[in-house]
């Protein structure tokens, strides 16, 4: 609102411009401008650009009016009608103090207008007060590992070293052989992480490409679940073959019996593939991939698994898993962004997605991203060595969930009854919008997300939660907390403290 007041002399201002200037998500602004318009403080403009303008002069709109419109309270008392510790009938010893502070704050907010806080106003921010101090950035807590994990020190060192390598890995001279050696060493590390042969690892630009490559094969039928990543679902829908959606139930787990019913009773056109993720990116629920792969193999179906969230968090043995292809992404376990792999079982030929040169044994054209691949290999090596830390991560996650339950008894952990990744919690607070919770936690220095990072710019309910049959009010209030090797008890404590101030009983009462 202060931004609108600062530009009152111009025409209507698009929310996208305000979002850019104030570093706020557009989806969040779109939500809060609905009650602001309903309160008569702003009006929307018609036309090609659209946007909003104030309905009154900035000096005629108080801060109290803005806060009331978006239901932001300034009360400092925590008494309620049925609270034995402090109520209207039996106030606590310090009730008068906090009531007086609340009244003074309300009076102050009512006396201050938007004109007072913009340039030239008596409460306008100076350049010094707006400057973000290094200590503020250093105090942030990152709990969004499923979106991307921080780059590991070992991966960064490997990448920096690779940037100084001159040769093209396809060249036969010494410089080229040096580059080739770095790639093959990384290939061995990635293969060890998932229990595959180095010859089965094909480097790609990421898991989206790897998934798309498999889905783009000339399948007559693709059997997949509704909770898969969009890189699987979107590519499957783009094919000319039949797409069979397998249900998951309330816990988000695919049942091999349902796949068997489609294949044995209803029949499917061949060639056919079953695409099933190893663990869900939003809920952390682990799928029975080996069991489904055994059925697929015994009935002549190909089997693909998206192991992006599982790699580095649970042991994977490609050799015994029974799948034909497996997708990986480096940045989920501390490697760089923009590099991944498709693990293809020996003697299985896929039609190339990218054609051109003979890189990756003529399976994936394009000069290899040497630095990214070097970082991928280094991260894979460390991730494999740290698999034994899963129990410690699970203890942190379980402690966080217990703390949240004590603060918010109505909170729901989606997929709680299923086997989950040790680092993931899908936390729902019915009646609260997830995007609002994410923004408020962000302002408190806590980074979490409202579902998949690849889809976080969209306004709407998660397709994963919809496929699980989660009630709309629960789905709309679900955030994802995902921890990692660097997460500490203090980080969990910081989240719990922030949650208490945002979603605790007193905050919800307000």
Image (tube, grey):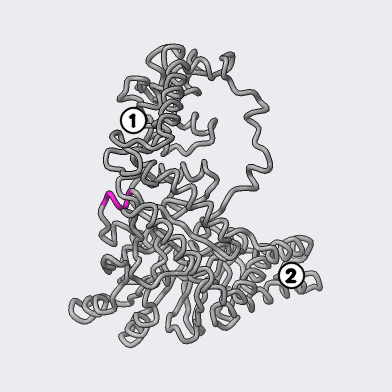
In the rendered view, does 488 fall on the left or right side of 73? right
Q: Quadrant of the N terminus?
A: top left
Q: Taking the image as drawn, is residue 349 in sight?
A: yes
Q: How many marks?
A: 2
The span from disc 2 to disc 1 (Cα, nearest Å) is 56 Å
Q: Is residue 475 magenta?
A: yes
Residue corresponding to mark 2: 179
The residue under the point 50% across, 75% down is 314
The residue under the point 33% across, 69% down is 417
- Most frequent secondary structure within the magenta stretch: helix
The residue under the point 49% across, 60% down is 482
Of 200 and 480, nearer the camera is 480
In the rendered view, does 226 fall on the left or right side of 441? left
Residue corresponding to mark 1: 34
Q: Which residues are magenta?
A: 472-476
Q: Position of residue 36 (x, y in %)?
A: 36, 26
């Amino acid at each position: 609102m202060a931004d609108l007041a600062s530009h009152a002399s111009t025409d209507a201002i698009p929310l996208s411009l305000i979002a850019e200037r104030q570093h706020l998500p557009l989806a969040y602004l779109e939500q809060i401008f609905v009650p602001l318009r309903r309160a008569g403080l702003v009006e929307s403009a018609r036309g090609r650009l659209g946007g909003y303008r104030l309905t009154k002069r900035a000096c005629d709109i108080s801060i109290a009016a803005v806060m009331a419109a978006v239901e932001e309270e300034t009360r400092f008392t925590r008494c309620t009608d049925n609270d034995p510790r402090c109520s209207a009938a039996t106030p606590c010893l310090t009730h008068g103090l906090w009531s007086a502070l609340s009244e003074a704050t309300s009076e102050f907010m009512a006396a201050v207008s938007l004109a007072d806080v913009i340039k030239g106003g008596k409460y306008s921010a100076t350049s010094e007060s707006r400057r973000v101090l290094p200590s503020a950035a250093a105090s942030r807590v990152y709990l969004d590992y499923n979106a991307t994990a921080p780059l590991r020190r070992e991966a960064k060192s490997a990448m920096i070293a690779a940037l100084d390598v001159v040769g093209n890995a396809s060249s036969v001279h010494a410089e080229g052989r040096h580059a080739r050696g770095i790639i093959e060493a990384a290939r061995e590390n990635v293969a060890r992480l998932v229990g595959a042969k180095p010859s089965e690892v094909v480097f790609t630009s990421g898991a989206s490409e790897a998934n798309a490559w498999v889905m783009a094969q000339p399948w007559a039928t693709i059997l997949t679940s509704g909770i898969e990543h969009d890189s699987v679902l979107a590519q499957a829908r783009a094919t000319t073959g039949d797409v069979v959606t397998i249900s998951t139930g309330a816990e988000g787990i695919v049942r091999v019996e349902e796949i068997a019913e489609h294949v044995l009773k209803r029949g499917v056109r061949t060639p056919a593939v079953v695409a099933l993720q190893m663990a869900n990116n939003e809920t952390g629920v682990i799928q029975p991939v080996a069991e489904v792969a055994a059925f697929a193999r015994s009935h002549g179906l190909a089997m693909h698994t998206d192991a992006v969230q599982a790699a580095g968090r649970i042991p994977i043995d490609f050799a015994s898993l029974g799948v034909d292809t497996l997708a990986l992404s480096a940045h989920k376990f501390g490697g760089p962004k923009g590099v991944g792999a498709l693990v293809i079982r020996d003697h299985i030929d896929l039609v190339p997605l990218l054609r051109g040169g003979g890189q990756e044994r003529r399976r994936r054209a394009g000069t290899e991203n040497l630095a990214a691949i070097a970082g991928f290999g280094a991260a894979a090596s460390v991730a494999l060595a740290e698999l034994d830390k899963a129990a410690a991560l699970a203890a942190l996650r379980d402690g966080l969930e217990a703390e949240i339950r004590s603060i918010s008894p109505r909170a729901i952990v989606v997929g709680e009854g299923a086997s989950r990744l040790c680092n993931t919690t899908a936390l729902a607070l019915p009646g609260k919008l997830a995007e609002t919770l994410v923004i408020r936690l962000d302002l408190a220095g806590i980074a979490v997300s409202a579902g998949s990072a690849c889809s976080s710019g969209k306004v709407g309910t998660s397709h994963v939660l919809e496929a699980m049959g989660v009630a709309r009010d629960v789905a709309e209030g679900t955030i994802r907390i995902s921890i990692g090797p660097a997460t500490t008890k203090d980080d969990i404590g910081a989240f719990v403290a922030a949650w208490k101030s945002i979603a605790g009983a007193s905050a919800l009462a307000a």
